[in-house]
Amino acid sequence: MRVPLLDLSEQYRLLTEPIRQEIDETLHAQNFILGPKVAEFERALADYCGARHAIGVSSGTDALLAILMALGIGPGDAVVTTAYTFFATAGCIARVGATPIFVDIDPVTFDISPAKIAGFLEGRCRKNEANQLFDPAGRIVRAIVPVHLFGLCSEMDAINEIADHHKLTVIEDAAQAIGAEYPGIKGVRQAGTMSMAGCFSFYPSKNLGAAGDAGMIVCNDDELAERFRIFRQHGMEPRYFHHVIGGNFRLDAIQAAILKVKLPYLDDWSAARRAVADVYREEFKASGLTNRLTLPAEPFRELGLTNHHIYHQYVIRTPRRDALQKRLTERGIGSAIYYPLGLHEQNCFQELGYHTGDLPETERAARETLALPIYPELTREMQREVVRVIAEFFGSEN
């Protein structure tokens, strides 16, 4: 049985008519850049997340880039983040001229480790008389960028406490976690809304996906939101009057129209993904595989949160990862490696001076993790086939 890693065709089949209607309305109006479709989706997304403002941009990458630019983070600055994430997280930091500082991850959740953040800031950085924090190379540490990886929120209370203590800005990379909930000291809040600003990606494969690139910034500060809006449009306000050098980060109206159709279905899709994850857990336990591989962590499940994990990816880990993936491919089952290298080991970041062994948990995750098929329409029969092939693989090793 062929089991693809992701199949979006059924989702489109169910929503074909309303999506086409929205696209036709946009085409008839001939209003393609920003405009009413974008404004409607921004309002809907802000309401969904519980944020005061949502600012539509051209991609999740551009969302983070615009935030960094608007906050004035640049040359001579350092930003603490994780090396176990998609390239854009650190790439945006480098593009504004700042330096990414990589710290290790929690081996259970794969999210950035608050203990490692604190260890770096308190053990290797120094403060001047003005209470500014400097890294070992003399750069001003300005911000922390946690990533809510695979659909599970980072430990935001601990991260915010560290940031408050050192007077740092927190920017949430929530590209993979729209709708994920976190049980914080201020109550249950959604990914992207627990810091100065958060960013989302609507890349087609995301839980809420466009028909191309699209992204969003969310925040609760009125002045900051207006600054983000100016930066997304070449620093222009009003038209042809440029106060700052921004970028062309505008959200396409057709993408906004498609996303507006899909947003009301997101909670149901998230519930379906959690149900798929539950079936995987049941089948792996029934097959006696839980001592051969590690299943995704669900640290908030027992707290009764609706969206304790929104499972953008279902990621297992095993030291036999590469051989297992080869077997799955031979049997027609899709899988993916997120991510084969920590960013500290990527060629483009070699000048930062990191070496293999500096971030052991990141490096171990890069060697051992494998994403299995997960999407709302995945059938139980297909899941059983995935588990059957994995059981066959480990059985052949005995």
Image: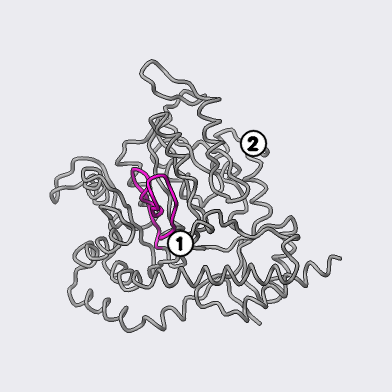
At a point 63% along the width and 81% down the height, the residue shown is 381
The residue where tag 2 is placed is 358
14 drawn magenta: no
How many C-alpha atoms fall within 10 Å of the one at disc 1: few (<14), some, or many (≥20)? many
- Looking at this rendering, what residue extends furthest in the right direction? 398
Callouts 1 and 2 close, C-beta under 8 Å: no
Q: Horizontal and vertical percent for residue 155?
A: 49, 45
Q: Amino acid at mark 1?
A: Asn
Against 389, residue 177 (above or below) is above
Q: Horizontal and vertical percent for residue 184?
A: 43, 47
- Bounds of the magenta span? 179-202
- Looking at this rendering, what residue extends furthest in the front direction? 303
Q: Who is closer to the viewer here, 254 or 316?
A: 316
Is residue 2 found left or right of 307 in the rendered image?
right
Q: Which mark is residue 168?
A: none
At a point 40% along the width and 40% down the height, the residue shown is 170
Point out the tag, 1 or 2, that comes first from the N-terminus: 1
Q: Amino acid at mark 2?
A: Asp
Q: Quadrant of the C terminus?
A: bottom right
- Colour mapping used in the image: one colour
Is residue 377 found left or right of 165 in the rendered image?
right
Against 84, residue 283 (above or below) is below
At a point 50% along the width and 60% down the height, the residue shown is 309
Residue 214 sits in quarter: bottom left
185 drawn magenta: yes
Q: Horizontal and vertical percent for residue 291?
A: 75, 60
Residue 388 sits in quarter: bottom right
Q: Who is closer to the viewer here, 310 or 242?
A: 310
Q: Horizontal and vertical percent for residue 106?
A: 59, 45
The residue where tag 1 is placed is 307
| SS category of the residue bearing label 1 | loop
